[in-house]
Image (cartoon, helix red, strand yellow):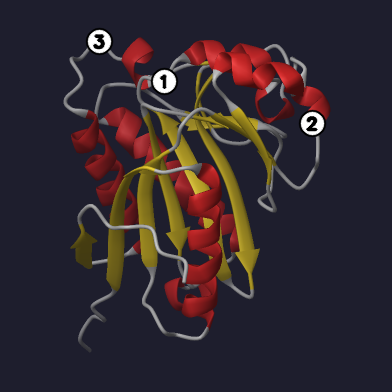
Amino acid sequence: MSRVLRTLEVWKLGVVNYLDALKLQEKLVLDRKSNRICDTLLSLQHPPTYTVGKRQTVHNLLIPQSDLEQIGAELHYTQRGGDITFHGPHQAILYPIISLRDVGVGARRYVEKIELTMIELAALYGVKACPGQTGETGVWVGDRKIGAIGVRISSGITSHGMAFNIDPDLSYFRHIVPCGITDKEVTSLRRETDLELPAEEIVQEQLISCFARNFGYSNLIWKEDASITTE
């Protein structure tokens, strides 16, 4: 029996305002539900942005919201799972818009595969990462968090996703309790590896390759410098 050739369309978007990316995801989720598009992966970065998940735990923001403008950051509430987190330059962010039914995994296995995607990327640079302990989301190097996960699943279609710290300004994390977990640090690939990092675009493409391998996509269609349209 021949193996099914599974296709993933990869959109490389560069730096995108968070709300623009959110609107795009909402449109693509509707398109995927109606089979107007194939499974799609958004690869991007955001300007400095704090996002709060469905738990609505804004108390884990440690500075007044009125002070966010002074540090050049925005705050947005979302329907993804999880607590508060930070998105910013020098992170590798992936938002999969995929059908879990077509992939053949449930919600729990989906999150495990996202964890494995970031763990494999870290391993390319000699960094041993692992999933968090009970109650700790994301991917960790010891007791230091290197990758965040916050997903939304609607009628079997995913959105939101993962953020892997390549070399972000970690000072932004001092203003929050990341993912609601106290007494833990946030780290980056730059801080943890002894190797010289290549250009960020290469690291982002490596993360995409790890994702495609873990989810069984053998045919990648690349949309370079894709534009944001939500019409």
Callout 1: SS = loop
Name the residue: 40% across, 28% down: 89
- Identified by mark 2, the residue type is Val
Give the residue number, with chain letter if any, for mark 1. 168
Alpha carbon distance from label 2 to label 1: 22 Å
Tag shown at residue 178: none
The mark that comes first in sequence, 3 or 1, is: 1
Q: From the viewer's side, name the closer residue of 80 and 109.
A: 80
Q: Is residue 80 shown above or below 158? A: above
The mark that comes first in sequence, 2 or 1, is: 2
Give the residue number, with chain letter if any, for mark 2. 58
Residue 136 drawn at (x, y percent): 66, 31
Q: From the viewer's side, name the closer residue of 185 and 200.
A: 200
Callout 3: SS = loop
Badge 2 vs badge 1, beta-carbon distance below 8 Å: no
Left or right position of 62 against 178? right
Local crowd at mark 2 within 10 Å, few (<14), some, or many (≥20)?
some
- Identified by mark 3, the residue type is Asp
Q: Is residue 30 shown above or below 63? A: below
Callout 2: SS = helix
Q: From the viewer's side, name the closer residue of 63 and 132.
A: 63
- Identified by mark 1, the residue type is Pro
Name the residue: 62% across, 64% down: 153
Name the residue: 69% across, 42% down: 82
Alpha carbon distance from label 3 to label 2: 36 Å
Tag shown at residue 194: 3
The mark that comes first in sequence, 3 or 2, is: 2
